[in-house]
Amino acid sequence: MGVVSEFRQFISRGNVIDLAVGVIIGAAFGKIVTVLVDGIIMPPIGLLLGKVDFAQLKIVLAPEDVATKTAEVAIAYGAFINTLIQFVIVAIAVFLLVKLVNTVRRQEAEAPAPAEPAPTPSEALLTEIRDLLAARRAAPPARVVPVKAEAATTPAVVRKPAARKPAAPKKA
């Protein structure tokens, strides 16, 4: 099998396409969260803390030198705080999404199975016949005693009980 056909088979699997869609949506969601944090959440927090722009907070280790054309060396902890807040927002959103999906799956699992439709009269009759045949097969066969044809047509003879002898007197 060639590399191209293996790659085509790999790409055509459903889970790979689902993963690709998830990555694309996640990237778009990440941009939305970045704008939310940088443009909406952090400005009021910065205003409360004395008109500070968190994205610009840093500890300068070595200032920029124009004469030697060296850039500033700084620890940008404000950008780190922004990124940390973005992470927390994304984590909460993913948690809520997973919780929603689990709730829906749990409700689907608890839902009763659809009831079977009532059988038609012909199906009911066939079911009854099937059950009778199964019961007959399961029961031991009855023993058939052959009856002579002559005996069946001959009238039965009724015998009178034998006469009793009188009891003998008891001797004392």
Image (cartoon, grey):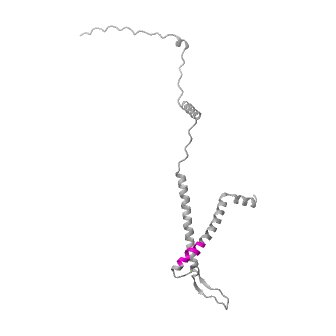
Q: Residue furthest bottom?
A: 67
> Is residue 75 one of those drawn in magenta?
no
Residue drawn at point x = 65 percent, y = 63 percent: 21
The N terminus: image quadrant: bottom right
Q: Is residue 7 left or right of residue 142?
A: right
Which quadrant holds the C terminus?
Answer: top left
- From the viewer's side, name the closer residue of 18 and 48: 48
Is the residue 66 above or below the residue 55 in the image?
below
Chief secondary structure of the magenta portion: helix
Foreground pick, 126 / 37: 37
Where residue 99 appears, as percent x and y from the top left, is 54, 61
The one of 122 and 45 positioned closer to us in this rendering: 45
Q: State whether residue 153 is above or below residue 6.
A: above
- Percent coordinates x, y for residue 115 in the rendering: 55, 44
Percent position of residue 53, x then y: 57, 80
Up the image or down, 14 lies above or below 169; here it is below
- Could you say where residue 15 lies in the image, as x and y percent from the top left? 65, 59
Q: Quadrant of residue 69?
A: bottom right
Task: Please tell me in which quadrant of the rendered image residue 158 appears.
Answer: top left
Magenta region: 34-45
Residue positioned 54% across, 52% down in the render: 109
How many dots with numbers? 0
Instruction: Please report the residue visible at 61 percent of the width from the left and 85 percent of the height from the top.
Output: 73
